[in-house]
Amino acid sequence: MKNKKRWLFVGSMILIIMISIRIVYVNAHVRKPELHSVTQKESLEYRGNEYRIQKVNLWEYTDYCKANPDLQQYMDAEEMERCRVIEVKFQLWRKKKKNIFDPNISIQCAFDCQGIDPFWFQTLNPKLVNGDFHSGDTVVIPYVIYQENLTRKQWQQVVEGKMSYTLIFSSYPVRNEMKITEVERMELDAEQ
């Protein structure tokens, strides 16, 4: 019985050592993704399309829902106070005959990444849903930023419009990203 336990222990240790060696080897020899980064004022060509940011707006969640009454609301009033909406307006140009528009562009805020809300995306972009979209039209992508995913200092930067954001189109084998440098704070009273 003692011999079985000893062999089981030795086998487990060998397995742990082999896994550790594999992890160290992969971390040291893995191919890092190539970085293709542009700023907000530049255009990014990705999957046969050219993206150019027209405007980036920062909204309070409640104001954004009031300005866009057709949007579905999923939160109660208390949760809405702890969120902000970043609205990115792109002009999308078809550059190649074979092209793919993938709306799953995530936004990075500090170390937190957020995806799009597919229902809001459909509501804000009826031409895409109906098939009436043409090269050069505008695409609106809203992102909800949650306070609980950020530190107090980072959240204050978001509220003040001083946080830097990065739109991530792809991450491997080439990381295509667009740095957002200018965010305009929007208020419902200013819009009306």
Image (spheres, helix red, strand yellow):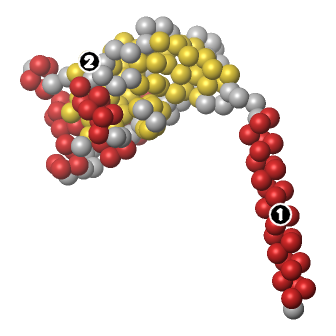
Q: Amino acid at mark 1?
A: Leu
Above or below — where is 95 with respect to 32?
A: above
Displayed quadrant of residue 59: top left
What is the crowding at mark 2: few (fewer than 14 residues within 10 Å), some, or many (at least 20)?
A: some
Above or below — where is 70 with respect to 148?
A: above
- Residue 81 position, x and y percent, is 19, 43
80 lies left or right of 40: left
Displayed quadrant of residue 159: top left
- Residue 24 position, x and y percent, is 77, 45
Whole-number angstrom distance, CA of label 1 to CA of label 2: 55 Å
Q: Give the SS element for disc 1.
A: helix
User: Label for residue 15?
Assistant: 1
User: Which quadrant, please, contains the N terminus?
Assistant: bottom right
Q: Amino acid at mark 2?
A: Glu
User: Label for residue 44?
Assistant: none
User: Does label 1 or label 2 sit earlier along the sequence?
Assistant: 1
User: Which quadrant, please, contains the C terminus?
Assistant: top left
Q: Among all residues in the image, which is located at the extreme top?
A: 42
- Residue at left offset 18%, top offset 30%: 67
- Residue 55 position, x and y percent, is 33, 15
